[in-house]
Structures are given as C-alpha cells and as structure tokens.
Image: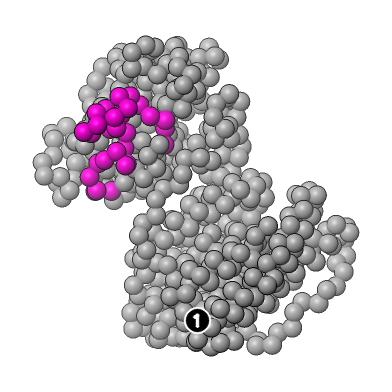
Amino acid sequence: MADDGAGSRGGASLLAGIAVLLLLTQAGSSRAGPPEAEGAACMLLVPAGPFWMGCDPKREEACPENEPGRQIDLAAFYIDRHEVTVAQYAACMQAGECTPAGEGGRCNGGRADRARHPVNCVDFSQAQAYCRFRGLRLPSEAEWEKAARGEQGSKYPWGDAPASCDRAVMSDRGGPGCGSGTTLPVCSRPQGASPHGLCDAAGNVWEWVAGDQAVSRGGGFDAGPQALRASARLASHRGLRNYYGGFRCAGDQAVDHELAALPSAPEERESSEKTALEQEAREQGQKALDHVIAMMRLIAEPGQDCEQALAQAEAYVKEHGADLGRKLRRLEQIEKEIGRDRWREIEKELDKLAKERFEDVSKTIPDFTRRCPEQMGRLGQLIKSLEKGEPEPAEPPAADEPPAERVPEPGLSAEQQDLLDIGLKRFESIETAIGVAPKHGKDCEAAIRELSAYVQAHREEFKQINRRFEALRARLGEEQLKQVDLKIVDRSQGTLRKVMQSMMDFHRECPQHVTRFNELMRAIDEK
C-alpha cells in the first residue's frame, strides 16, 4: 500500500497495520481518484445495501416527474467497469451469438480504429444477446444507478461538481464528444469514475437497462450536463439502434471468460480466473478494512480514558481476530497467484478506499495520539496481532530483544533455506534502517538526515538483497513458497514488532516529515 518498505513480506499480511498508519498520518486528505483503466478488473462488485435512487430535491433545483426520489435496497451484484467495446462485441459476432452492430455514419461498428470505443448502434435485443453470450444480463435501472452514483446519491458519478470534459465525454462549447464529434475510447476520463469505479457512467453513450420500460441511462457524447446527471432517464424504443446508444452488462457473479481469448487491446486480455481473483481480493480487503475501522472507532471518542479505549480495542481483536486472520491469509494467497504487478494495483485501490473510509474518525484519532502516547505504543502490538489474525497480550515489547538466530530448518530444500535466509535478512535491513530515526528523539530533521544518509549508503546492498530474494522466489513452486513464507513470518515476529513500533513513533512525533520518511522506506524496496 502506501509504504511497501518491507518488500515481499506479503502486502496482505500488513494490510491492517498499514491501514492504521495511514489513518494516523494521512487521514483527512482529499478524496483520491478512481483506479486507472489500464490493468483494472473488467467487472466490479457493488456491495449489498441501500442507496438513494432518483432525483434528490436537496441537490437539484427542480426534479423531473420521471425521476421520483426514494430509498432502494439492493442485493450485491457485479457490473462491467466500462461500456462494452467494439472489439468485445466483435468477438460475440465471430462466435455467431450476436448480429452485426450498425455501421456507417456515427456508428462505430466495423471500424478497426475504434476497437476501444464503446459499441453503439445496437438495439435492446442485441445488447441482451451479447450479455447472455458472456453468461450475464443487462443491469436493472436500480443496479445501474447505484453503481453510477454510489450510496450517497451524488448528482453525478464523481460527486456534485459541474459536468465538464475533464470528467465526461460530452457536448460542451467545443461540440459533441468534447470536440471530437464522436465517442472516445472507454475509460478515457478517469476523473469522472463513480465511487464504485465505473468509467463513463456519465457520457460517451447512453446505456440500455433492463426493466418494464424501454429506458437508457447515463447520457451520451452529444449530451449536455442535465442529461449526464446520475438520475437522468431517456425513454426510448427497444428496436432503435441509435448512434448515441450502447450498454454494459451485469450479473450475480463476475464472468469474463471470453476476454482472455479476444484479439483486443492488451489491457483487456486478462484471464477470467485472474480477474475473479482480483475481485475476490478487493472484497476480502474491504472486509479486512471494516475490522480495522471498527477497532479505530473504539478509540476515536474524544476525551475518553486511555486505558479504557485500549481495552475496548483489545476486546474487539479477541473477538474478531480469527476472522480477520483468515481474510489476510487468503489475500496473501491471491497475491502469489496473480503476481506482484497486479497485486500492487489492488493495493492502490485499497489504499484509496482506506483514506475515504477513515475520514469520519480522522479528526479524533490525533486526540488519542496526543493524550495517550503509552497506549499508542501498545496499539502497535494490537496491529501485529491483527496481522496474525489472533489476539496477543498488549504488553510493551522488550527493548533489547535479540535478533532471530540463523538455525537450519528441517524439511527445507537448499533453495528454500537460501530464500528463508535472505528473507530474514530483508527484515533485518528494514529494522536497522528504521532504527536510525529514533536515535535523535524528537529532532525530526536530524532523524531524516541520518536515515537518508543510511539509505543512500546501503542502497546497492538493498537492491542486491531484493533481487536475490525475487530470483529465489521465481525458482520455487507455490507449496515450497508457502512453507518458506510461514517460517519467515514465524521467525520475524520480534523484528516486525520493532519495525511497527518505530514507524508509529516516528509518524506520531514527526508528522511533517512523514512523506519523506515513506519515500526513504520505499527506496529500501528498490530492485
């Protein structure tokens, strides 16, 4: 996530701890943008729960009669991240399951130069046929709107800020399509993504939705701001094949089986198996963050007794630690299966989610940090127990705990033993680097200077260790890696405790230097 300083210690295994550090040091920052189009999942999960559907008189000057506002409760569902593209629809045609989309004029069908544009000039039955081809369906109006605007019922997918070509492919003073006169490639306006990550939920093409009436949603490339509102509805006829109309699919499960074999753009060639794993990682990560948020809220009440607050957090860990542990272990498995690069993208999304979800307690946590420095240190051990998924007594760690002794491990091959040794060495490198900062007490400038000098002096050494570590991992199978990873975690508990404690101490005492501190930690992980 924000700080990957410990290298391949398993991004998931430190999810809870990093999320708490994020809260203590970065909460209250502006809302981060949605994930970028490239490499992101093809389908997104919209969790179960209520949302505001229709025009909201609190946000609108006047509400159209066909947009009645009300609270709707929906079950969880999946929906395409972007509108169905010309290349995707062509695959259905090649399989004999879809009839040709319209061609000529403003239609995108049959144009190789618009493979990444949304398919348009398709009627309702053609949209249905394509979704069936993928084992999916068209979203209902309610599903589409919840995915497009989120639970808070914002005016547009991105919030209540005015519509513009920075956020949507629309008609402005430059003309339709932001001056292009036509559609643009899907996800070309990432700043306009919805809270759930949908691209082009406003603009590009109107989208067919399922229901008793023939309706499209979302506005098109030739639509103005009023039509781009999340609650806007366009009455139509299901036999029409308009140049401004397209669609996306939804379902109860994420299904992208045909994308792996498509001769489409590289970012759309992800296998359905890895896409499903990525979505599972998002779900498990969100649930893990729920645990962390619940714990932090227990200590967020202003002015409460320090020991009482910590006792409440400890009780929560005792009750829920096992469940969190299962989720984190599953995340570690997924990380190995999908690869480090794709995992980093998921980490970024969870990082952004953490910032947004912690906003409501960001103003009260600093009060606890200021009033309860001793309990703040013990909270570091709570974080460690959350990472393990099981409770541990919140006693201060021994100040002079010796490093783990190198002992040959029975049952490991020579390569596994090498990986274990280099993995433990990585942890010790992090511990040594972080241990430089506290030597200066609260002299933050001096701490950063010495830490920077240390990192620069040992940068090549860090790189050699990291490269060796990755090279050894590449030679071993999944079961062999699992054996080694478990032993690394088991042998590094003392180091982990010291690292987390030192990081929290520095973040608490030197908040103005956190950005530079995190940069130096990331430098340790360079290859």
Q: 158 left or right of 76?
A: left
Magenta highlight on residue 172: yes
Nearer-the-camera pick, 361 or 175 = 175
Q: Is residue 230 above or below residue 525?
A: above
Residue 227 seen from this side: no
> Residue 165 lies in what quarter of the image?
top left
Which percent across, then down, holds residue 305? 39, 86
In the image, what residue type sits under mark 1? Answer: Glu
Which percent across, then down, holds residue 223? 24, 29
Magenta highlight on residue 242: no
Per the image, the residue denoted by label 1 is: 445
| Range shown magenta | 159-187
Q: Residues within 10 Å of mark 1 (few under 14, many from 20)?
A: some
Nearer-the-camera pick, 234 or 136 = 234
- In this picture the colour scheme is one colour
Nearer-the-camera pick, 111 or 251 = 111
Residue at 39%, 77% (x, y): give it: 366
Residue at 15%, 50% (x, y): give it: 58
Residue at 52%, 79% (x, y): give it: 506
Task: Determine the main secondary structure of the stretch shown in magenta.
Answer: loop
Q: 485 left or right of 54?
A: right
Q: Is residue 512 above or below residue 107?
A: below
Q: Is residue 6 above or below residue 217?
A: below
